Amino acid sequence: MSINTPKNVERCKNVTLEFEGGKAPYSIEVTNGTEADFPEIVVEIKDIEESPYNYTVNGTQEKIGFILHSDDEKTAYTGNVKIAENNSVDDDGEC
């Protein structure tokens, strides 16, 4: 199973996550993008039926990463990427 590492990630914009393998339904954990054995999970998205999946980047973290889980207990990881700032974001990371 695999999931793409998104490029050009900007706060308040959508990123398209494409993945293959495994069995639906899927879940995606959005992490704070730090290198760690147990990264901090910022958001968990459940019951995803198919690829691609569009996610709107928000929050105040500087980096982001994604962990894909399938119903047949497979796991795939993206790389961690820096989030580019967006001038239309308020101080608490809301769009």
Image (tube, rainbow, N blue to C red):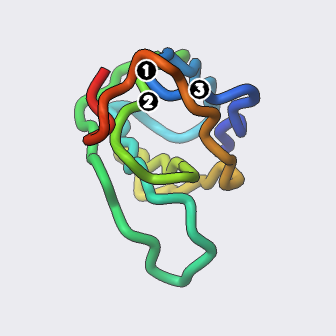
Q: CA distance from mark 3 to mark 1?
A: 6 Å
Q: CA distance from mark 2 to mark 1?
A: 5 Å
Query: Which residue type carries mark 1?
Result: Cys
- Residue 10 is tagged as 3
Instruction: Pick whichever of labels 2 and 1 is earlier in the sequence.
Output: 1
Query: Which residue type carries mark 3?
Result: Glu
Q: Do labels 3 and 2 touch, CB within 8 Å?
A: yes
Q: Is residue 46 left or right of residue 70?
A: left
Q: Quadrant of residue 94?
A: top left
Q: Do labels 2 and 1 touch, CB within 8 Å?
A: yes
Instruction: Pick whichever of labels 3 and 2 is earlier in the sequence.
Output: 3
Q: Do labels 3 and 1 touch, CB within 8 Å?
A: yes
**Residue denoted by label 2:** 57
Look at 54% across and 49% down and name the residue there. 64
Residue 3: x %, y % from top left: 65, 39
| Quadrant location of the C terminus in the rendered image | top left
Sort mark 2 into few (<14), some (14-19) or many (20+) by Cα contacts within 10 Å. Answer: many
Secondary structure category for the residue under label 2: loop
The relative height of residue 93 versus residue 38 in the rendered view (above or below) is above
Look at 69% across and 32% down and name the residue there. 6
- Residue 12 is tagged as 1
Residue 93: x %, y % from top left: 32, 37
Q: Quadrant of residue 42?
A: bottom left
The relative height of residue 25 versus residue 42 in the rendered view (above or below) is above
